[in-house]
């Protein structure tokens, strides 16, 4: 996966709209688990973006906001679903923690996992 593909995937997943009903945040808001392979693709994209931006002091707002939303809102939707009685897949909690750690890595410039 190259940087542009990774960036596009993360923006599409993080800045979820009705144009992308299978975006992670949309699925979690609807109480649906991720599509098989979706979290793996997101984690791979995060690693690619980390490698590309590791030495950069600045990066664009659209990417930054999508990363923030992926890390924070996915956790919030997971917790909301848990409180509503949704039986999430067993590894989703850990996957969301991995996403948050990878996003943190991008912001601090040092891989956290």
Image (cartoon, grey):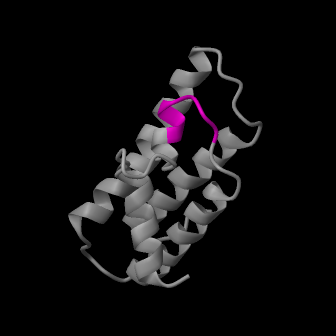
Vertical relation: 43 (above or below) 86: below
Q: Quadrant of residue 54?
A: bottom left
For residue 71, side relative to residue 33 (left or right)? left
Q: Looking at the figure, which quarter contains the N terminus?
A: bottom right
At 60% from the left edge and 70% from the top edge, which residue is drawn?
Answer: 44
At 74% from the left edge and 42% from the top edge, which residue is drawn?
Answer: 91
Q: Looking at the figure, which quarter contains the C terminus?
A: bottom right
Where is residue 88 shown, x and y percent of the image? 69, 31
For residue 26, side relative to residue 93 (left or right)? left
Where is residue 8 shown, x and y percent of the image? 40, 70
At 53% from the left edge and 61% from the top edge, which residue is drawn?
Answer: 102
Where is residue 56 shown, x and y percent of the image? 31, 81
Q: Quadrant of residue 86?
A: top right
Q: Nearer the viewer, residue 111 or 70?
A: 70
Q: Is residue 109 visible?
A: no
Q: Is residue 28 magenta?
A: yes
Q: Is residue 44 visible?
A: yes
**Numbered range of the magenta stretch:** 27-33
Q: How many marks?
A: 0
Q: Is residue 31 magenta?
A: yes
Residue extending furthest toward the front: 19
At 45% from the left edge and 48% from the top edge, which residue is drawn?
Answer: 71
Residue extending furthest toward the top: 84
Q: Nearer the viewer, residue 10 or 59?
A: 10
For residue 85, side relative to residue 89 (left or right)? left
């Amino acid at each position: 996966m190259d940087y542009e593909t990774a960036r596009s995937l993360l923006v599409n997943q993080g800045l979820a709209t009705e144009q992308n009903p299978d975006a992670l945040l949309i699925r979690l808001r609807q109480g649906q688990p991720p599509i098989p392979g979706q979290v793996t693709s997101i984690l791979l994209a995060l690693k690619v973006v980390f490698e590309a931006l590791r030495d950069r002091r600045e990066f664009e707002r659209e990417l930054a906001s999508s990363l923030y939303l992926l890390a924070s809102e996915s956790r919030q939707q997971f917790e909301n679903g848990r409180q509503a009685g949704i039986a999430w897949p067993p590894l989703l909690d850990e996957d969301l923690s991995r996403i948050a750690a990878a996003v943190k890595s991008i912001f601090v410039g040092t891989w956290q996992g």
